[in-house]
Amino acid sequence: MFESLSERLQGVFQKLRGKGVLREADVDEALREVRLALLEADVNFKVVRDFLLRVRARAVGTEVLSSLTPAQAVVKIVNEELIATLGGGLSKISLSGSPTVVMLVGLQGSGKTTTAAKLAWQLRKAGQRPLLVAADVRRPAAIQQLLTLGKQLDIPVYSEGSQVPPPQICANAAKRAREMAYSVVILDTAGRLHVDDEMMAELERVRARTSPGEVLLVADAMTGQEAVRVAEEFHRRVGLTGLILTKVDGDARGGAALSIRAVTGVPIKYIGVGEKTDALEPFHPERLASRILGMGDVLSLIEKAQAAYDQKQAQKLEEKLRTASLDLEDFLEQLRQVKKMGPLSQVLEMIPGFSGAARFPGYDDALSDKQFKRLEAIISSMTLQERHNPNIIDGSRKRRIARGSGTTPQEINQLLAQFRQMQKMMKMAAAARGPRDLHRMFGG
């Protein structure tokens, strides 16, 4: 996410670094480019205007223009103002009721039902006892979808079918939750293709019957400024307490995430970064700002790595990284672990120096299920000597491996190229972070 914006901003700051001493005119020229980059990323024009006014007021001061590293001072100011625009800090979900009722609202197609299940799973990991409520009686498949997701995650779902009015379903569910000692009730309410009075009136009745502690709008980040307008209307009618932006991983521009908090005044509490159950993350403004500016997000990377690796794997990987001795068996194992951490493009964004323009062509393909099975077949068809020392794999060996794995020599070449890219990435990561940080990242 934010690939184009990140690349544009990093290019602007690179020009500033090349100037050494900064004049006020240099700052203004850079801010004009920043303005264009933000507008092209679909950021609300009022948000862009206010953001640049704050940055300029600080960037043309004595502190920056007389600094020994003025370009770095400007980057620091932009980073701080980005964080402020995004909300300032982590805004946690409020769990104060007994039980706490969390009401999810949004347009049809925003990913509300899937998000309800993801949120329930997140809360259960945090020690809560969630109850999902199928209150979307208008979309034929919504109830069955939630029941299926609940079964997959082993999370109970309250449903009364499609004939009972949603306000009644939600009130009954809250009563059942009190009787059964559930700590959180998550209401999956109906969406529409657009905001209308009938929809809002129904949501107002649900709110009146259940007194939710949280009213969270689930908004599709890929709709850009439309997501901001939708948020404003929902906030006006039902009083939002927070936002969940979905499909953030599919939005290369990112304008909705940068605009929606500033325009509505309502905090973003979670972002959806994929389809898997664990692809719902608490929203950290400071981490996102760091990624946008190409400074990585080591804290999130550490959290993902610690969740994916056990202690033995961590110690083995740390030693391999320090000695640059990764082989093809390690390569396969690391692909398995990275798949657990999410799409590789998102993992790379978290490593300082790998954001923006730094890409590894073909690497995401290596993590698709189909291609991953091919990689396993290819490596399994190699001898132990070949796995530990792939440099000995010549043309005749490639043909033998291809026959054994049902692939082609060209695919063997592609695998070896991807392996060399991984070696390069790991060496650079090790050099960038150092042994202590590697131990912290993978050793806990």
Image (cartoon, helix red, strand yellow):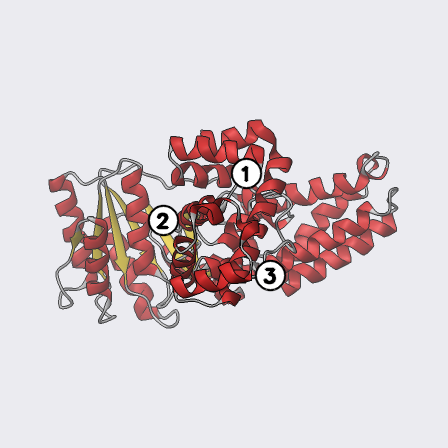
Residue 376: image quadrant is bottom left
| Residue contact between numbered discs 3 and 2, judged by CB atoms under 8 Å | no
Is there any visible trace of residue 3 in the rendered image?
yes
- Residue at image point 54% right, 38% down: 325
What kind of residue is marked 2?
Asp
Residue 213: image quadrant is top left
Where, quadrant-wise, is the N terminus in this rendering? bottom right
Circle nearer the viewer, 3 or 2: 2
Which residue is disc 3 drawn over? 44
Image x and y of residue 319, in percent = 51, 31
Please tell me which residue lies in front, 209 or 59. 59
Secondary structure of the residue carrying tag 2 is loop
Circle nearer the viewer, 3 or 1: 1
In this picture, residue 163 sits left or right of residue 439: left
In this picture, residue 434 sits left or right of residue 221: right
Q: Which disc, if any, is residue 278? A: 2
Which residue is disc 1 drawn over? 325
Neighbour tally class for label 3: few under 14, some 14-19, many 20 plus, Cα within 10 Å: many
Whichever of labels 3 and 1 marks the residue nearer the N terminus, that label is 3
In this picture, residue 363 sits left or right of residue 444: right
* Whole-number angstrom distance, CA of label 3 to CA of label 2: 30 Å
